[in-house]
Image (cartoon, rainbow, N blue to C red):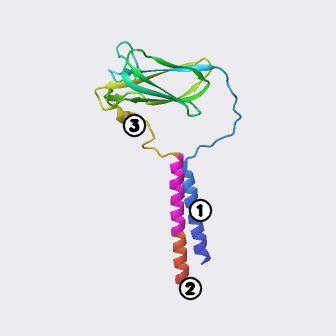
Amino acid sequence: MRLIRWMSLLAIAGACATGLLALNLPVVQAAVPVPQQGTGQICVLAFSDTNGDGVDTNPDEPLLAGVNFKLVNEAGKSQNYTTDGSSEPYCFGNLAVGQYTVQARPDAKKVKGEATTPGQWVVPLASGAQYDISYGVQVGSQPAESAANSSGSGGNMSTLGRIVVFLLGAAMFGAAAFLAYTIINRARSA
């Protein structure tokens, strides 16, 4: 009877350890933030990538209208700009030093094609720096919205999702182990 209890506890502990290892949670080390002064800018443009190489070789590849760029700072405040195909590059200026996320999303009604560059960038902006982003679409190939959606988190589970799945799995495994223990214990008692 003690052997069964120990085996159940070892099985539960093994499942918990395996689940924690599968989470691949990043190790976070405490650091004292050092505030930086100054501003910088992030400039964006969208281009028709005629040769599909992901590189803007202006003037051979014209600017592209109908792509929305969303800039989000560390506090979650966002700014948007939609390309018009003639006045780019557009610069988000006077940005405080810090980390920014930039997302490019083509308007499915205006832009038909496959993205040839990533649709999302993380920019660590330093004082006085300018960061240039070029988003390419090979017009006439696959719809651009499928390429834009592939850069999101649709196929990847978030850390919170992994934790929830792990906890549900551990709870189910624990319940099954308890049920097996109870059945075996009652069978031996009878």
Q: Residue furthest bottom?
A: 190
- Give the quadrant of residue 119: top left
Q: Give the residue type that dot 1 points to.
A: Ala
Instruction: Determine whether 19 is above or below 144 in the image.
Output: below
Tell me the crowding category of disc 1: few under 14, some 14 to 19, or many 20 or more residues within 10 angstroms, Cα based: some
Within the image, what quadrant is residue 147 found in?
top left
- Give me the C-alpha separation between circle 1 and circle 2: 27 Å
Instruction: Give amino acid for label 3.
Output: Asn
Is residue 126 shown left or right of residue 141?
right
Q: Nearer the viewer, residue 167 or 81?
A: 81
Read off the residue under disc 3: 149
Task: Please tell me whether residue 2 belongs to the stretch shown in magenta.
Answer: no
Q: How busy is the neighbourhood of tag 3: few (under 14 within 10 Å), some, or many (20 plus)?
A: few
- Helix, strand or loop at disc 1? helix
**Number of numbered discs present?**
3
Q: Which residue is mark 1?
A: 13
Q: Is residue 19 visible?
A: yes
Residue at 34 percent of width and 14 percent of height: 60
Q: Position of residue 25 (x, y in %)?
A: 57, 46
Closer to the chain start, of discs 3 and 2, is: 3
Q: Whole-percent x and y of residue 143? A: 31, 32
Would you say the residues marked 3 and 1 are in contact, meaning their CB atoms lie under 8 Å apart?
A: no
Residue 2, position in %: x, y?
A: 62, 76
Please provide the residue range marked out in magenta. Answer: 159-175
Between marks 3 and 1, how big is the CA–CA gap? 38 Å
